[in-house]
Amino acid sequence: MKLCRFLGFITVAILTTCLVSLSQDKRKIVIDQDAAGPAGTDQQAMLLLIQSPQTEVLGITVVTGDAWLTEEVAHTLRMLELIGRTDIPVVPGAEYPLVRTKEETEQWEQRYGSVAWLGAWTPRVYHAARELGAMPEGKPTTKAADEDAAHFLLRMVHKYPHQVTIYEGGPMTNLALAISIDPEFASLAKELVFMGASLSPQTDDPEFTDTPRREFNL
């Protein structure tokens, strides 16, 4: 009996050590995403990172891109409710680009030709910025964090200096705002993983016809 108890104690100690080691080795991530939904590629990318045993998602900062900020935040909140991860904060970010306007984009198209995908400005899917749009998965009951994305990003890299990976899955407006507030932001982050453009595209997608090595996020 003493031997069994001893072996049991050793087993528990080893498992505890392994679990602590796994927890310490997890990559800390902030997801900065234009979170169009429901169930599109933006949401799927977030689900992959959230459910990976190798990651600890500190928060999701949202930026207007493929859709407007208001609806992106709602889809993200609802997605987290559905998978039981409402512990992850959803932080609203930039609603508009810092430079280009919808009118300037339309003038550009008149001169140089139409652009297949303009995100929230794409005519066939366009609606006003603050409208929620369709929510077939149901509206969320949880609320977004009472903070803006740029300051959340800054708070995380100061809290965990040189430990935070920023996954950038949308336009980099939130990152630009964070840098403008604190120029040390980039050096305090561990790394930036960015989804944008392609090296050797092979596709018939009209978005890439005239500019095959760039895409909407750029």
Image (spheres, helix red, strand yellow):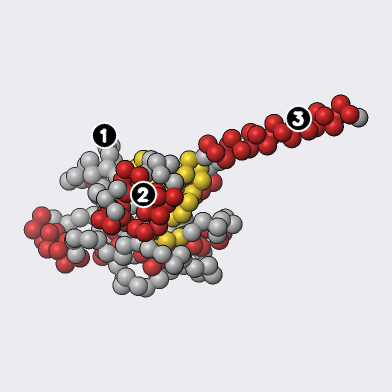
Where's residue 20, x and y in %? Answer: 61, 38
| Badge count | 3
Q: CA distance from mark 2 to mark 3?
A: 44 Å
Numbered mark located on residue 97 in the image? none
Task: Return the residue at label 3.
Answer: 10
Residue positioned most to the top? 3
Q: Residues within 10 Å of mark 3 (few under 14, many from 20)?
A: few
Where's residue 129, x and y in %? Answer: 32, 70
Numbered mark located on residue 200 in the image? 1
**Mark toward the viewer: 3 or 1:** 3
Q: Are marks 1 and 2 in contact (CB under 8 Å)?
A: no
Amino acid type, mark 1: Ser
Amino acid type, mark 2: Gly
Q: Are marks 3 and 1 in contact (CB under 8 Å)?
A: no
> Could one spot residue 193 in this view of the protein?
no
Where's residue 196, x and y in %? Answer: 29, 44
Q: Residues within 10 Å of mark 2 (few under 14, many from 20)?
A: many
Q: CA distance from mark 3 to mark 1?
A: 53 Å
Task: Give SS at disc 1.
Answer: loop
- In the figure, 103 relative to 214: above or below? below
Task: Give SS at disc 2.
Answer: loop
Residue 81 appears in which quarter of the rendering? Answer: bottom right
**Mark toward the viewer: 2 or 3:** 3
Numbered mark located on residue 169 in the image? 2
2 or 3: tag closer to the N-terminus = 3
Q: Residue at x 28, y 57 (%)?
A: 181
Q: Residue at x 78, y 33 (%)?
A: 9
Left or right side of 17 for 206: left
Left or right side of 17 for 139: left
State the residue in front, 126 or 162.
Answer: 162
State the residue in front, 205 or 112.
Answer: 112
Q: CA distance from mark 1 to mark 2?
A: 20 Å
